[in-house]
Image (cartoon, rainbow, N blue to C red):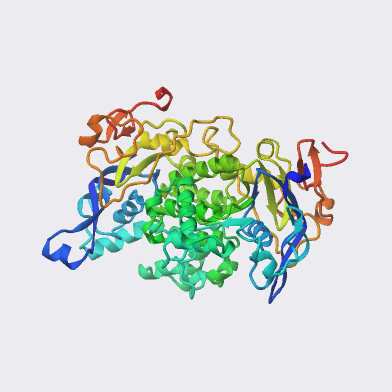
Amino acid sequence: MSNLVELKNLKIHFQIRSNFYEEVIRGRKRIIKAVDDINLVIKKGEIFSLVGESGSGKTTTGRGILQLVKKTDGEILFDSQPIDSRNSGYMRRFRERAQMIFQDPYQSLNPKFTVRDIVAEPLQLMGRSLSAGEQEDRVIEALEFAGLKPGREFLLRYPHEISGGQRQRVSIATCFIMDPDFIVADEPVSMLDASVRADILKLFVAMKAQKNTSILFITHDLSLAWLISDRIAIMYLGKIVEIGSAHLIAGGALHPYAQALTSVLTVVGSDIKRKRIVLEGETPSPMNIPPGCRFHTRCPHVREKCLVEEPKLLENEPGHFVACHYPRPIESIT
Amino acid sequence: MNNDRILEVRDLKTYFKIREGIVKAVDGVSFTLEKGESLGLVGESGCGKTTTALSIIKLLSDNGYIESGEIVFKGINLAHMTEEEILTHRWKDISMIFQGAMNSMNPVMKISQQITEVIRLHEPQVTLEEARKRVRELFKLVNLDPGLMDSYPHEFSGGMRQRAIIAMSLALNPSLIIGDEPTTALDVMVQAQIIDLINDLRKKLGMSMIMITHDLSIIAETCDRVVVMYGGKVAEIGPVEEIIRNYRHPYTEKLIKAFPNIYGEREMVASIPGVPPNLIDPPKGCLFAPRCHRKIGKICDEVAPELKAVSRDRHFVACHLWGEGHE
């Protein structure tokens, strides 16, 4: 499998306004390091999950790739080419190929548009010269792919007339109609009842299988990431701490943060009970990142080296990368 | 045994009047809660779990009302109390932790003030100094630094705010606490911390609790027994372990199977086809029948199933699959 997206030393920092005195007189700037030097690769036709708590930088990474926020430093390659954000022709084509699905289907759909208008809008924006009939056929096809059957019955409905799950299906149809190579799905099911989540996730799996689409699935829900991902990365405070297969979630983690995060996941109906590792305190502010390993303030196995030297993300075994000075499997910890 | 009974809800019916008709949000729900016990109410959005809880402390919106039934709290029926009468019980005897700590605090009042206000409203003889002393104790109890009690809510992180809300709910030493999705908006690790805190407090204070959530894993972590609700009715009720292992209701089965088992095979979880019933004009038979994968025939469409005991272990189910003659 070749690479579709490559991030090289990507940094996305935000400057926030403090007061006039601090900023102008003393020249101090307050900077949030939302994404702080990450490297990763998303292959063609894979579902790659970014998992982390709020403030870990997972959403910013996704938005950064789609050029919805500006990078501060580093490189973003799409199809082995740097994304040329100043070239409007290139960006037009890029926007067709890379799509986004947002978390909240109540806010991401225009309430004054019918379902047909919403799904057909990208076709029109991209200037596809289709007859009205062809366009309608495409919309119906997209709706039915997204599980809104029969599609024709949904064409004239408004977002408020359909349920939350159906709205998210409309978002997916809107994305599907462009036949994209890449989709960033930011918490696409976290607002939905557990009973409909599965069906929505199945659509991503279907898109990957039928169209070889690459999907970046951003979620805080470890079990959902486990369920559909080919590979998973866990983020903490702007850094990737571990990348590996889905087994990472089911006890295969080597980084202490990843181990803690996966240990508190309750599995309903399983006899396997893990010792819960509940970390104290909360994630430090991304404005004030601890020196050395940024997890050292909460790490249960912290040693001296961790206070001064930031660990690199290194390959521990084939395909399994960890950013920890002293990685070890969860069973060996006493 | 009955002295240990904190709460008994009998055939509770709570309806809402809307333009289109009457919504039977809770329609004949019964359960009991013993002293020190923790009971979970679980179900999809709109199943009536929050309405059941709001009926107990009578915080229903203006168009909602208790049609019939009894809510017996320590021998007193709350169901038909007036607003004035319930005020003496609300918060003092029964308090509630609401969903979204962010929105249940006053943003322009110090947290200490918000808690002392509650204390002194119900116990006017308490001086401000005594009340503040109690706030300090409460902060320690929920593992918050008492030195931060004069902060404003925005100065706290989400987890700290949720701890403060829990402290507030404990301010008057109530015998029953109702938690409405108390961990839903929190991060994974903070959620684990709050669950530990709740379990710790239950042990320390012998607190009785009703936990409302759509997340079965939280019920599994914090509750002794669980009520599975569907369409405003009880589908199944029993001890948590028993329900998770030996569920009988097809809806419970679907609910459990909707959770991926990360230690098992990686297969796509089953979802529940169809939509929850219209509670203005509910179907005549079993409410779950139109979505049920184990329907046995006409009886499901025509006769509403009663709750029947399926084991000696206080496990009851409302489903025609189970009962006399079957097994």
List x then y, in percent, for residue B308. Answer: 81, 45
The quarter of the rendered structure image containing the N terminus of chain A is top left
Determine which quarter of the picture holds residue B249: top right
**Residue sitting at 32 percent across and 47 percent down?**
A284
Does B291 sit left or right of A187 as displayed? right
Does B273 sit left or right of B67 as displayed? left
User: How many numbered discs, if any?
Assistant: 0
Q: Nearer the viewer, residue B154 or B40?
A: B154
Q: Nearer the viewer, residue A218 or B215?
A: B215
Q: Nearer the viewer, residue A290 or A75?
A: A290
Residue A20 visible in the current orientation = yes
Residue B185 visible in the current orientation = no
Determine which quarter of the picture holds residue A103: bottom left
Q: Nearer the viewer, residue A163 or B309?
A: B309
In this rendering, is residue B284 above or below B4?
below
List x then y, in percent, for residue A54. Answer: 38, 51
**Residue sitting at 56 percent across and 51 percent down?**
A199
List x then y, in percent, for residue A301. Answer: 33, 30
**Residue sitting at 49 percent across and 53 percent down?**
B134
List x then y, in percent, for residue B192. Answer: 48, 42
The quarter of the rendered structure image containing the C terminus of chain A is top left
